[in-house]
């Protein structure tokens, strides 16, 4: 290659395959006033002679330096850019740096090949140049060029004279220039130009640099390339590092490992970084603080407390001593994330290692101050003085803040004085910190004095100064002074912040300055505050003084029309009015709004209705609903369901049902909540049949699974309707749904399904409830007592009864149930014991208890005790019921005491009670035992006359009475009659 210039001439040519020559514009050497430089780049001489510290034959720049003979010193370094074409390598361009003393310029550039072919335009425009930089006595610049015609990488020289010019031997010059060239290399490469050169390498140059690396390249050269890649691409850095590893370039190469760790840290590839640290020791590299600092640095920048702490602990475990940079980065990270425990550990380790890092002390003070641990922050200050660590400006400011935050303003003033005595120039941040501290302590006289002293120390108040003064006077409720500093802030060209606006609005609200409030709102609008934020600020200010009713008037005087255009502002305003019971103002905003968003509007109405419902203001909810835009086409499911619930709570079941029917007719698909609300509406109205109809509709919807509340409503409804099969179905549905059972669910299922489930399943459910730590209520205990008692499981019944008594949940029903259970099992002793416990517990003896005693004594032929119970009933004036009389008829009938039976019947009628089916059946049985067959037949006729339909027991008792008295023919007739009646019943049922 030949490069043409008109500024210098240096007689330097070397025996290389590619060459560069600088001549004048005519292609000939210039006169003495002009100079030219002829340079050459080779493929192998750089490695063999070790002149190129980069170890790359493509980087020819360090061998190509020339100096003019008389005028001035100049040099050039050149980097060839090669590409592959058809399997051959060509030079397609290059990048070169030019260095010359002031006054030496480079004007024209022209490139030739050794074959003499012109390969570029002879103008400076063909070269992209960079800005010149003054370094010492020389001016350096960077330039790059692209050739129109690529030059082959290898050009054969015909003879030694092929490279001659003007009859001079170029090979002899090489030996004379080696020392000067190598000296120049070390100076250029190791100087400041090197890093600048690395930063300015283009992507194309970088690709050429990497492609020129080969296994024989030096470690220094590989490290240089790795350093360049680390600044450009983490991926390429890791790839090149792996290449170096494969070719044995990492042994004792700590710098390469540090560069790779830095790239891996930026990728947050921590596992690979950990493996790399382990590999360093196997490659005989020194594991030092620099390696870990590369990782900790990224963690500190990105706020990764966990990983930063992990690397620090690993560093300590490896026995590596951290340096000041390590501690500084970690403490900065912990300060940013306010990680107290980690900061204390790092701080303690720093002191134990006798390291002095001012940043660490400052970070600890900041963390303690931020957490309100002011005593701790003062301890750190004392420790810092004890450790003889001199505070810097940042540390002094941190101390100021620590004292100011806790109101120790004398100590803060002392810190300020020490700053001035130490020769530190007055700092506006320090004064602002003190002013803020005085403001928090409500010492505004001292704050104002500091503010006035600013001018005397040569400082001008900044926006923070004014803002602190506004906040301070706001705390002391000094509206006049706060307003003065607020105006000064604006007049000084500063912008108030949101805190200043909020402070001023609160002051204006308390002092009744509505005109000033309007002006502040306008300032907020001009400052770019959103209308929703402005509305929230004014509402909060007037809510504090309980005068929200003034807000509409203030807004109308400012930008009420703009608020009506913003849905969010309208919703905030409306909700505030509703909270303060200003329903008319809220409805007026909804009526005046000027935005169209159907979904947002419906959600807002629903929110208002629900808020009224939760507050118990049902009438207000109805008013809001009536103002809603009517939509006959689209019915909002959630709003309508909320209104159904509200009407139900108000007892307006007709309106609630009409809404339900309207919603149902609109074709809207009901969800689980809708069904739940409608079912609850019918339950409240006492219309259990309609509730069952709705539940039947819901059960047909396969996608709907009731929640725990709807399941309870279903159980209670079916229990009241005595639908045992439905209860069992719902129970197994609950099990299948997999919902979590709570205490209320267990109690509800046991209470409702006590007689719908097998006793074993009910017992299992009860035991599960106890094991899960749920408490049973009184009804649950009574249900389990009744189930166990009727099933003859007296042992389990006693256990439940004992638990109910222990928890104080046994009531009179519990005692009655246990008395009846023992009486039914003819355990008279236990029955009497429970009866006595009931009296001892203070419960009055109920009719049910007396009936159980009568039944048990009568069936056990204990007539004396039987009569005693009847006597006690008379003494206690306990009126008998049907069950009592039936027991007496049954007992007397068994004995054949017809007179007593007749007396009981007469007494029954005297008390206004009519015999029921059980009474008549018992009477027929008694007549049969007494041999009074005709009277027994007359009883059946009397039953028919009174509209009481005989059942199978009636006919069985009558047939038994006839057979006992040898009226077999009559017995056969009644038997045939009974069978005929049963067939009729079966036919009707079909």
Image (cartoon, grey):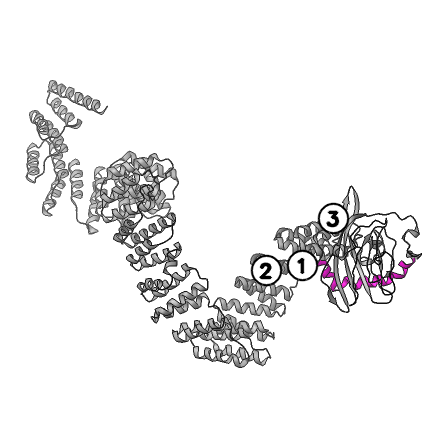
Neighbour tally class for label 2: few under 14, some 14-19, many 20 plus, Cα within 10 Å = few
The residue pinned by badge 3 equals: 246
The residue pinned by badge 1 equals: 291
Q: Quadrant of the C terminus?
A: top left
Q: CA distance from mark 3 to mark 1?
A: 21 Å
Which of these two is toward me, 425 or 819?
425
Q: CA distance from mark 3 to mark 2?
A: 32 Å
Which of these two is toward me, 765 or 702?
702
Residue 798 quadrant:
top left
Task: Kindly report which numbered mark, 3 or 2, lies closer to the viewer in this rendering.
Answer: 2
Q: Earlier in the sequence, mark 3 or mark 2?
A: 3
Which of these two is toward me, 481 or 780?
481
From the viewer's perspective, is 39 left or right of 235?
right
Residue depicted at x 33% and y 50%:
605
Up-down: is 359 above or below 248? Answer: below
Q: Which residues are magenta?
A: 172-199
Task: Kindly report which numbered mark, 2 or 1, lies closer to the viewer in this rendering.
Answer: 2
């Amino acid at each position: 290659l030949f490069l043409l210039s008109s500024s210098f001439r240096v007689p330097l040519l070397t025996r290389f395959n590619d060459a560069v020559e600088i001549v004048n514009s005519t292609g000939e050497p210039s006169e003495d006033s002009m100079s030219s430089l002829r340079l050459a780049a080779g493929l192998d001489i750089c490695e063999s002679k070790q002149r190129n510290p980069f170890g790359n034959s493509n980087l020819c720049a360090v061998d190509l330096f020339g100096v003019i003979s008389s005028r001035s010193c100049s040099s050039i370094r050149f980097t060839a850019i090669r590409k592959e074409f058809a399997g051959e390598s060509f030079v397609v361009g290059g990048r070169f740096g030019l260095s010359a003393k002031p006054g030496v310029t480079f004007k024209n550039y022209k490139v030739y090949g050794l074959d003499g072919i012109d390969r570029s335009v002879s103008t400076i425009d063909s070269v992209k140049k960079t800005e010149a930089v003054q370094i010492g006595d020389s001016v350096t610049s960077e330039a790059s060029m692209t050739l129109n015609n690529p030059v082959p990488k290898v050009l054969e020289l015909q003879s030694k004279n092929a490279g001659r010019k003007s009859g001079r031997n170029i090979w002899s010059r090489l030996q004379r220039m080696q020392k000067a060239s190598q000296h120049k290399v070390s100076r250029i490469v190791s100087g400041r130009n090197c890093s600048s050169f690395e930063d300015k390498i283009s992507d194309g140059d970088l690709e050429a640099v990497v492609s020129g690396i080969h296994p024989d390249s030096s470690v220094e050269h590989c490290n240089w390339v790795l350093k360049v890649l680390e600044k450009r691409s983490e991926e390429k850095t890791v790839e090149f590092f792996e290449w170096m590893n494969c070719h044995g370039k990492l042994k004792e190469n700590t710098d390469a490992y540090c560069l790779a760790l830095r790239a891996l840290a930026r990728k947050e590839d921590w596992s690979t970084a950990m493996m790399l640290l382990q590999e360093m020791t196997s490659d005989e590299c020194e594991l030092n603080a620099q390696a870990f600092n590369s990782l900790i640095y990224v963690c500190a920048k990105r706020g990764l407390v966990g990983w930063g702490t992990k690397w620090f602990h690993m560093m300590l475990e490896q026995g590596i001593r951290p340096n000041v940079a390590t501690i500084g980065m970690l403490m900065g990270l912990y300060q940013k994330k306010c990680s107290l425990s980690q900061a204390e550990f790092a701080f303690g380790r720093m002191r134990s290692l006798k390291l002095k890092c001012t940043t660490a002390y400052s970070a600890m003070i900041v963390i303690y101050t931020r957490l309100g641990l002011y005593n701790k922050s003062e301890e750190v200050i004392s420790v810092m003085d004890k450790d003889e660590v001199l505070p810097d400006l940042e540390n002094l400011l941190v101390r100021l803040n620590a004292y100011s935050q806790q109101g120790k303003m004398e100590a803060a003033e002392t810190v300020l004085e020490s700053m001035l005595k130490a020769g530190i120039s007055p700092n506006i941040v320090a004064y602002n910190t003190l002013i803020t501290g005085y403001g928090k302590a409500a010492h505004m006289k001292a704050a104002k004095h500091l503010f006035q002293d600013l001018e005397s120390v040569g400082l001008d108040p900044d926006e923070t100064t004014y803002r602190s003064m506004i906040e301070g006077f706001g705390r002391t409720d000094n509206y006049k002074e706060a307003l003065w500093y607020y105006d000064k802030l604006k007049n000084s060209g500063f912008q108030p912040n949101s805190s200043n606006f909020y402070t001023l609005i609160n002051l204006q609200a308390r002092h009744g300055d509505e005109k000033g409030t309007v002006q502040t709102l306008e300032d907020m609008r001009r400052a770019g505050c959103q209308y929703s934020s402005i509305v929230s600020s004014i509402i909060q200010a007037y809510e504090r003084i309980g005068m929200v009713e003034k807000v509409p008037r203030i807004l109308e005087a400012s930008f009420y029309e703009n608020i009506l255009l913003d849905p969010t502002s309208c919703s905030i305003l409306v909700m505030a009015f509703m909270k303060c019971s200003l329903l008319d103002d809220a409805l007026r905003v909804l009526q005046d709004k000027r935005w169209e968003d159907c979904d947002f509007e419906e959600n807002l109405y629903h929110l208002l209705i629900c808020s009224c419902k939760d507050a118990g203001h049902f009438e207000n909810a109805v008013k809001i609903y009536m103002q809603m835009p009517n939509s006959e086409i689209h019915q909002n499911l959630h709003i309508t369901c909320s209104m159904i619930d509200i009407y139900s709570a108000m007892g307006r079941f007709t309106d609630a049902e009409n809404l339900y029917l309207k919603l149902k007719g609109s074709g809207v698909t009901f969800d689980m909540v809708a069904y739940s609300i409608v079912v609850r509406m019918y339950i409240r109205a006492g219309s259990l049949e309609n509730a069952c109809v709705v539940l039947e509709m819901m059960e047909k919807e396969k996608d709907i699974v009731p929640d725990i509340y709807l399941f309870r409503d279903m159980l209670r409804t079916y229990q009241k309707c005595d639908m045992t099969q439905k209860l069992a179905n719902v129970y197994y549905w609950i099990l299948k749904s997999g919902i979590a059972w709570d205490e209320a669910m267990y109690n509800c299922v046991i209470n409702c399904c006590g007689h719908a489930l097998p006793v074993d399943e009910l017992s299992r459910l009860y035991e599960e409830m106890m094991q899960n730590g749920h408490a049973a209520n009184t009804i649950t205990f009574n249900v389990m007592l009744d189930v166990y008692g009727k099933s003859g499981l007296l042992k389990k019944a006693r256990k439940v009864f004992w638990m109910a008594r222990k928890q104080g949940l046994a009531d009179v029903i519990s005692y009655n149930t246990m008395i009846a259970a023992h009486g039914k099992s003819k355990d008279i002793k236990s029955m009497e014991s429970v009866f006595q416990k009931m009296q001892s517990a203070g419960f009055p003896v109920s009719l049910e208890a007396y009936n159980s005693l009568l039944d048990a004594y009568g069936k056990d032929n204990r007539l004396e005790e039987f009569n005693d119970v009847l006597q006690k009933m008379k003494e206690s004036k306990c009126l008998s019921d049907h069950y009592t009389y039936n027991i007496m008829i049954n007992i007397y009938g068994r004995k054949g005491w017809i007179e007593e039976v007749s007396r009981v019947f007469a007494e029954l009628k005297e008390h206004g009670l009519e015999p029921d089916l059980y009474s008549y059946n018992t009477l027929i049985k008694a007549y049969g035992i007494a041999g009074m067959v005709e009277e027994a037949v007359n009883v059946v006729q009397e039953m028919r006359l009174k509209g009481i339909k005989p059942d199978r027991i009636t006919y069985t008792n009558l047939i038994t009475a006839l057979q006992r008295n040898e009226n077999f023919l009559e017995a056969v007739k009644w038997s045939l009659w009974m069978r005929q009646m049963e067939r009729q019943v079966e036919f009707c049922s079909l």
